[in-house]
Image: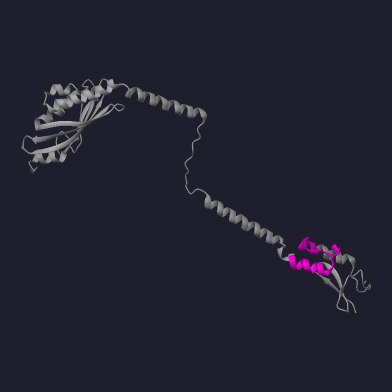
Amino acid sequence: MNIFRVENNYNDLYQTSDCGGDLNERDCPLSEEQQEPTTEVNNRNERAKAVYGSVIPTAENEMNRGEVESYSKDYSHISILPHQRSLLIFVSTAIAVVFALAILPTTKNPVPIPLLSASSNNNHSNNNNKDYAQLAQTMSNPTYRENLLTTAHALCDAFANKAPLDKVLNQFALDSDDTFCFEHGLSRLAPFLGKKFSGKDGVKEYFTIISNLLSYQDMKFSDYIVDVDAAVVSVRGEATFLWKSTGNRWEEVFTYRLRFDKAGKITAYEVWADSGAAYLASKGELGD
């Protein structure tokens, strides 16, 4: 007795005989009772194609069962269903997004990189050339540097030789109200500290207070440093000072910073000295 069997996995039509062998339907035609309507078979084939795609062969391929079984065993595991394809796309996209976020800069406000055009580069180069030319011209002009150094030496020599006040004042630009003297320190430590003495009268007042309160000996200067561009001369000084009212003495190292105008006159006189020693000497508390 022949039993009719349909293999859904391969969408092919087979017939099993009493002998145990599978025969093609064309070799052993079925009876009319055993045959299924052609329309129903075609519908099943179409549904199988919609589910499994074209990877699985059908009866229309005219492949025998052995070939179909071999194909199914070797390649059926690599077929990708629609929902699997969607999952694979989602996972790939997620990995790409995570990787992109990991390599992005972490700064909140990245500093923009300026893009210089050819014209801006030329302008910048021209400005640098002008600055270098001006610097070279200033440094190649020894007259102004010598004027600054000459005035600084004249002032320091006047101090060292205890020259009259008028000779000291001659080194200052007294015609300008911006000219000043300033000795750094707390104003409560001494009356000449921490106060800006401006103009002709102010400069004269500063040196008058100094001469009334202090005397000195063995004053000398060294290490003159000239900054032509800033019109500044710095100098190191040292001397032994005496607070007249208490008789207390102390040795001190101090620094002058002198700024000049175009004529080579002093417009700013700044002093850094031992204000603590001056305070103790004023109180008579400075020991030997």
Q: Is residue 104 left or right of residue 151?
A: right
| Quadrant, the C terminus | top left
Q: Is residue 101 left or right of residue 211?
A: right
Camera-side residue: 288 or 222?
222
Q: Reply yes or no: does residue 48 show up in magenta.
A: yes
Q: How is the image coloured?
A: one colour
Camera-side residue: 198 or 94?
94
Residue 192 place in picture, x, y as percent: 15, 33
Residue lying at 59% horizontally and 56% vertically, measured from the top left: 95
Residue 53 place in picture, x, y as percent: 77, 61
Magenta residues, start to end: 47-74
Q: Quadrant of residue 217?
A: top left
Up-down relation of residue 112 to residue 209 (above or below): below
Camera-side residue: 78 or 207?
78
Up-down relation of residue 176 to residue 187 (above or below): above
Q: Quadrant of residue 235?
A: top left
Q: Reply yes or no: does residue 285 show up in magenta.
A: no
Residue 264 place in picture, x, y as percent: 25, 22
| Quadrant, the N terminus | bottom right
* Count of numbered marks: 0
- Principal secondary structure, stretch drawn in magenta: helix
Q: Quadrant of residue 20?
A: bottom right
Residue 54 place in picture, x, y as percent: 78, 60
Residue lying at 16% horizontally and 29% vertically, measured from the top left: 206
